[in-house]
């Protein structure tokens, strides 16, 4: 392939695309706004599925490296009510169907698998201009600009490439997460650690929840979930972590003590994560030389565990299309998008449904029913 390929964003989707192309001697350059791979926390655990994410990792030649870093047994799932009463308990079994891995570990595998000069860190996209011959010029905040034949937007929820193709913007789902971490939780918060079990705990009720994971080293990683207006989160003074958590804990004052302990304390600065989503049926009209991957294409809530898997699979599918049609990139982009749209719409619909099950009026019974269908 003699066409230049520019990827905006060094997330899972863009990295997978670049890695598979590299294996086939097709150069691509990633431009990432962050100054380095370690510039910010990468979030918690991901369960990588054997019917999409693992397929991508096998195509990237990274499956064995992935298996070396999965966390056997941490795929256990437990559901309790607001008092901590056990409603569902699925032990971890080390299966390779949906093994867990830290997002940071997975991203590092991908970063290390491509030439160091293929990622340009500290390049925040400022503007895109169409050029003659169906090409594009991308200009970055540091005044660097590049011209390219194929522009791939893998730049996440607030993609700056998306507006070339679509007027759709992410919409607040009504649910916000507050992410906290407690180190040495087995000793310091023994009752909470015991309630969580060996994997993930879901304590949910209408409009709120505590979703926590117990790592093998005793770290307790929690996402506090609240159905609140977007303005509620924006009005909170997050500069004072203790006061902010106390304000949030007031929403859980009648919950069981081991659960409440996960809300009132954090050994790291709490991260506030309002959950946004694109329309379930998001798609766009084909435009020469440009496409989208990952959250830029199909941002959705995390309640089907599919976001990272879709991102990996997007990168794989686009790479396969470009490899199979090296002299016709427009046909390759068309093939990729024709597969992408129905696949992402199906999973986005599932995710939207699951969000309503987690925090709707029938929770937690609705969540128990959901997991019994899939795990029991």
Image (cartoon, helix red, strand yellow):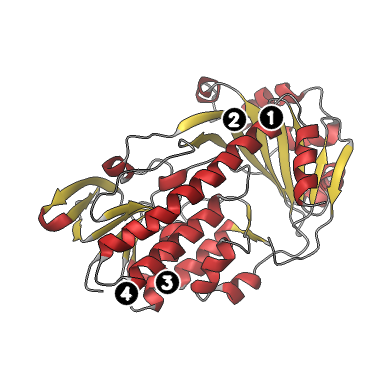
Q: Position of residue 80 (x, y in %)?
A: 83, 37
**Nearer the observer, 26 or 125:** 26
Badge 2 density bin: few <14, some 14–19, many ≥20, Cα 10 Å: many
Q: Position of residue 209 (x, y in %)?
A: 71, 32
Identify the image quadrant of the N terminus: bottom left
Q: Residue at x 79, y 54 (%)?
A: 76
How far apart, in angstroms, are the residues tagged by discs 3 and 1? 39 Å
Q: Position of residue 309 (x, y in %)?
A: 55, 56
The residue where tag 2 is placed is 175
The residue where tag 4 is placed is 26
Residue 31 visible (yes or no): no
The residue where tag 1 is placed is 359
Marks 3 and 2 close (CB-CB < 8 Å): no
How far apart, in angstroms, are the residues tagged by discs 2 and 1? 9 Å
> Which is in the foreground here, disc 2 or disc 1?
1
Q: Is residue 294 found left or right of 134 in the rendered image?
A: right
Q: Is residue 44 found left or right of 366 in the rendered image?
A: left
The residue where tag 3 is placed is 20
Residue 82 visible (yes or no): yes
How far apart, in angstroms, are the residues tagged by discs 4 and 2? 41 Å
Of marks 4 and 2, which one's residue comes earlier in the chain? 4
Badge 1 density bin: few <14, some 14–19, many ≥20, Cα 10 Å: many
Give the secondary structure at mark 1.
helix
Give the secondary structure at mark 3.
helix
């Amino acid at each position: 392939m003699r066409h230049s390929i520019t990827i905006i964003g060094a997330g899972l989707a863009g990295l997978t695309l670049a890695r598979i192309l590299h294996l086939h001697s097709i150069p691509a350059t990633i431009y990432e706004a962050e100054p380095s791979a370690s510039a910010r926390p990468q979030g918690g655990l991901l369960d990588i599925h054997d019917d999409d994410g693992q397929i991508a990792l096998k195509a990237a030649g990274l499956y064995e490296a992935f298996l070396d870093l999965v966390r056997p047994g941490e795929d256990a799932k437990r559901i309790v009510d607001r008092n901590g009463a056990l409603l569902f308990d699925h032990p971890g079994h080390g299966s390779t169907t949906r093994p867990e891995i830290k997002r940071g570990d997975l991203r590092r595998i991908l970063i290390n698998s491509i030439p160091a000069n293929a990622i340009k860190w500290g390049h925040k996209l400022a503007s895109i201009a169409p050029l003659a011959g169906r090409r594009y010029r991308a200009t970055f905040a540091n005044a660097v600009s590049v011209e390219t034949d194929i522009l791939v937007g893998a730049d996440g929820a607030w993609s700056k490439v998306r507006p070339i193709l679509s007027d759709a913007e992410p919409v607040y789902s009504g649910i916000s997460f507050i992410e906290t971490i407690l180190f040495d939780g087995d000793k310091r918060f023994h009752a909470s650690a015991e309630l969580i079990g060996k994997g993930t705990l879901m304590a949910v009720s209408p409009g709120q929840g505590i979703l926590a994971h117990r790592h093998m080293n005793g770290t307790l990683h929690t996402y506090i979930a609240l159905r609140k207006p977007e303005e509620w989160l924006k009005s909170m003074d997050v500069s004072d972590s203790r006061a902010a958590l106390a304000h949030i804990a007031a929403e859980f004052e009648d919950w069981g003590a081991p659960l409440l302990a996960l809300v009132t304390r954090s050994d790291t600065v709490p991260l506030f994560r309002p959950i946004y989503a694109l329309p379930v049926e998001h798609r766009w009209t084909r435009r020469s030389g440009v496409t989208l991957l990952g959250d830029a294409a199909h941002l959705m809530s995390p309640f089907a565990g599919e976001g990272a898997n879709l991102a990996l699979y997007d990168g794989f599918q686009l790479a396969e299309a470009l490899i199979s049609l090296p002299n016709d990139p427009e046909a390759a982009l068309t093939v990729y998008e024709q597969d992408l749209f129905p696949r992402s719409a199906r999973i986005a619909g599932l995710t939207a449904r699951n969000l309503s099950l987690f925090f709707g009026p029938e929770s937690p019974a609705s969540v128990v029913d959901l997991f019994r269908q899939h795990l029991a």
